[in-house]
């Protein structure tokens, strides 16, 4: 099967599964590009019609020929946003403090949302509910950040559509890949990375949106430091809309998954912002910081007295491991041959510098921090517990920085390292050691 056929198969399977809950019916005869009838008008899109559709090309997209019972409307989309916010009191508090409700309703209703987009979102809600929740969260937060940055109404509207559209491509790839735990194979990772381009193709078929919308969808996994994908673009090459939705996606993951398990809230997001300020446009981090501060959220205190003295000991060990990782990373990039040039090597060198600057700026490797950690006693519980938790969060985010950057190393070794470089074996061995050290550092968080 070619890629197009595989994508069709996954989406038709989604439609057939939705039909088990809500009717999905052909509103007119469905023909292929040669005029051959595939499915008559009025036919339910069930699994039995799967083979009649899969693999065929049509002059229009399949969604134009079908309808879904109970499809989302502008009003019900607003209700879905409100339902999401009601699940998280801290999000509700930010929403009310910023007085964003009226603008959200305006975005959903003033300019009619295309029917096919609402239909796609309905299918996403029923088939990939976690991705639907992330879509709502990222659209909500991305638009609120755009408003806080005082971007134009058109920029805010474009961010709204980038948010709604950016992950629709996931409906067209193998759902087992989306739910997979653990690492992807090279082929699986290629399929997952391709979802942005599928989303762009879907968006172009739905409506003639502004070019910024298509660009934002393509760029929502790019990072200002060149460590993103698919093109490893940098700050000056990136639009605001894609960056805002990309930042919102990550904060969604932290808040709804990582923090939901630990009991933290958006008030605990500041260490992430401090550690990752090189990854996204500076103005977006400033806006995020301002939103959290204005909402006056209370920081969750999750450290009990019984576990208190174990934390500084763990932080001392983490500090050693993070320092060793950075020193090894610095040694690795120092080995690059002078003739090595390319976006991967540039991203690795600059990321190493950024991580070093972050460690120094936050005082994570200072003698004073070590002295303080070693001096903590049980009597310091009330005074030190909040600062210890923030330091722990910063260590965690630094390890994510290493993990993100180290993903570039295989591409650098394969694509940019001169084939006959004398140092190639040493660089490969060094890279393997760094990966092992990173895995060891993560054991503290298992």
Image: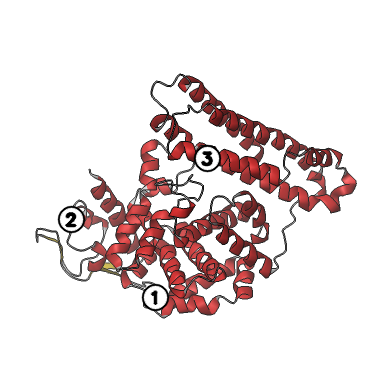
Which x, y percent locates residue 92? Answer: 61, 70
Q: Quadrant of residue 311?
A: top right
- Asked whether residue 348 appears in the rendered view, the answer is yes
**Labels 1 and 3: the sequence-earlier one:** 1
User: Looking at the rendered structure, which numbered label has been put on residue 405?
Assistant: 3
- Asked whether residue 408 appears in the rendered view, the answer is no
Q: Nearer the viewer, residue 83 or 309?
A: 309
Dot 1: element: loop
In the shown orientation, is residue 389 left or right of residue 242? right
How packed mark 1 is, by other alpha carbons closer than 10 Å (few <14, some 14-19, many 20 or more), is some
Residue at 47% of width from left, 49% of height from top? 234
Q: Residue furthest front?
A: 338
Labels 3, 2: front one: 3
On-image quarter of the N terminus = top left
Dot 3: element: helix
**Distance from label 1 to label 3 (Cα)?**
41 Å
Count up the numbered dots. Answer: 3
On-image quarter of the C terminus = top right
Residue position for label 1:
73
**Labels 3 and 2: the sequence-earlier one:** 2
Dot 2: element: loop
């Amino acid at each position: 099967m070619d890629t197009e056929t595989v994508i069709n198969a996954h989406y038709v399977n989604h439609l057939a599964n939705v039909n088990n809950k809500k009717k999905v019916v052909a509103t007119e005869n469905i023909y292929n590009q040669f005029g051959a009838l595939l499915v008559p008008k009025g036919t339910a899109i069930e699994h039995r019609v799967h083979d009649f559709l899969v693999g065929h090309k049509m002059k229009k997209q399949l969604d134009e020929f079908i309808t879904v019972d109970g499809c989302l409307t502008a009003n019900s989309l607003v209700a879905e946003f409100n339902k999401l916010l009601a699940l998280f009191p801290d999000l509700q508090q930010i929403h009310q403090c910023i007085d964003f409700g009226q603008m959200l309703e305006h975005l959903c209703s003033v300019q009619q949302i295309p029917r096919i987009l609402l239909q796609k979102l309905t299918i996403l809600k029923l088939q990939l509910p976690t991705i639907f929740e992330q879509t709502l969260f990222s659209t909500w937060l991305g638009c609120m950040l755009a408003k806080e940055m005082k971007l134009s109404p058109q920029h805010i509207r474009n961010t709204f559509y980038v948010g709604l559209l950016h992950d629709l491509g996931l409906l067209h790839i193998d759902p087992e890949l989306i739910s997979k735990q653990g690492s992807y194979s090279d082929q699986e990772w290629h399929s997952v990375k391709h979802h942005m381009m599928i989303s762009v193709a879907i968006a172009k078929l739905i409506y003639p949106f502004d070019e910024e919308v298509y660009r934002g969808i393509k760029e929502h996994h790019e990072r200002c430091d060149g460590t993103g994908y698919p093109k490893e673009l940098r700050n000056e090459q990136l639009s605001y809309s894609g960056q805002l939705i990309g930042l919102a996606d990550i904060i969604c993951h932290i808040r709804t998954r990582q923090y939901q398990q630990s009991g933290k809230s958006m008030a605990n997001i500041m260490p992430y912002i401090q550690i990752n300020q090189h990854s996204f446009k500076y103005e977006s981090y400033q806006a995020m910081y301002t939103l959290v501060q204005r909402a006056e959220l209370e920081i969750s205190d999750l450290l009990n007295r019984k576990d208190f003295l174990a934390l500084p000991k763990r932080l001392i060990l983490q500090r050693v491991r993070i320092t060793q990782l950075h020193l090894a990373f610095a040694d690795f990039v120092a080995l690059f041959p002078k003739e090595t040039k390319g976006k991967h090597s540039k991203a690795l060198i600059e990321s190493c510098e950024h991580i070093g600057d972050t460690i120094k700026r936050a005082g994570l490797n200072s003698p004073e921090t070590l002295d303080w950690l070693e001096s903590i006693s049980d009597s310091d519980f009330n005074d030190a517990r909040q600062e210890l938790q923030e330091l722990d969060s910063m260590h965690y985010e630094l390890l994510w920085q290493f993990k993100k950057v180290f993903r570039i190393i295989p591409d650098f070794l394969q694509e940019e390292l001169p084939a006959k470089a004398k140092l190639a074996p040493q660089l490969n061995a060094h890279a393997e050691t760094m990966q092992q050290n990173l895995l060891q550092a993560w054991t503290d968080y298992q």
